[in-house]
Image (spheres, rainbow, N blue to C red):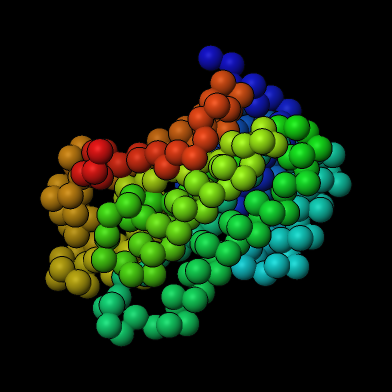
Amino acid sequence: MDLGLKNRVVIVTGAASGIGKQVAIAYAKEGAFLALADINLAGLEALAKKELKGANVYFEKVDVTDAKNCEMFVKNVHKHFGRIDVLVNNAGTAKMGDMATFPEETFRAHAELMMYAPVRLINLCIPYFKKNKWGSVVNTASIFGKQPGGLISYDTIKAADIMITKDYSNYLAPMNVNVNAVCPGPVDTPLWYADGQLGDQLAAATGMDKKGAIEWFAKTNIPMERYAKPEEIANAIVFLSSVPAHYITGVALDIDGGMVKGI
Ligand code: NAD
């Protein structure tokens, strides 16, 4: 199938690691032009030099929680490529914690990163989508926006992301822009495996070692008994923003090995 993404300009946030990195690689394979944002500049540089060698890539150190930074980035992308076609809102993080004592400042920081930043970036891209008379947005939500994972800030904000997706899908449909979300279950990325991240937090909560805790979680919660590979999420994101999928809008697609129980 021709996805019609050749020479389209795609913004990916949180592109230096995990899902975002594989999203960038997947778009590059389709011949898209890439505009990558992350706070991890060294990660972006390494990606551009290695996995994206030969692709048409623009990247910048961007903190998506900073409104001015986002504004400049989107302007610079347009200046560099002359158009913007696709926005993938992917930057994110997660933290386990007791609900009764979960720090308010962490909750607010997570909302800045995973709720306000996607809204801000969608709004910044709208004028360019209008110019094209075409556009596509994919937000990285989570199955924990559909059923509770016990991560109070994360679950709440990912549920908001699904509603943001639905509201913007209605608002932007007359402008020929589709807006969808992907809802991954657990994915094999640094968000789980890096030091101090969810794997270590789960290990501390269960008294197992990190590897054992992650395997136990997969076996007891995921019908397919394994975490997703980041490529499996990237493929769905690329498809949802493709030309043949353009009539799909307002969808929050589970990619979870069967973990969500609702129909
Ligand atoms: P990751 O930690 O590997 O990558 C996240 C990226 O976001 C990093 O490169 C990080 O530097 C970047 N980032 C963080 N704060 C930023 C900021 N302020 N500005 C710009 N960039 C910033 O994690 P991942 O697993 O690839 O997660 C990507 C997205 O997928 C997140 O939104 C996450 O919530 C979502 N998700 C992940 C899983 C999972 O199990 N890994 C499951 C469902 C949803």
* 75 to 50, vertically: above or below: below
Left or right of residue 235, residue 98 in this image: left
Locate residue 189, reporting x and y percent: 40, 51
Residue 188 can be seen, yes or no: no
For this rendering, which residue is in front, 33 or 66?
66
Up the image or down, 235 lies above or below 44; here it is above
Left or right of 109, for residue 229 = left
Disc count in the image? 0
Residue 179 x/y as whole percent: 56, 41
Q: Quadrant of residue 171?
A: top right
* Location of residue 84 with respect to 64 vertically, above or below: above
Q: Position of residue 70 (x, y in %)?
A: 71, 61
Q: Is residue 142 left or right of residue 42?
A: left
In this orientation, which residue lies closer to the viewer: 166 or 12?
166
The residue lying at 35 percent from left, 40 percent from top is 254
Q: Residue furthest top?
A: 1
Give the quadrant of the C terminus. Answer: top left
The foreground one among 56 and 241 is 241
Residue drawn 72% across and 48% down? 125
| Image location (x, y in percent) of residue 211 | 23, 57
Is there any visible trace of residue 110 in the rendered image?
Answer: yes
The residue nearer to you, when weighing 121 against 62, is 121
Q: Residue at x 57, y 33 (%)?
A: 241
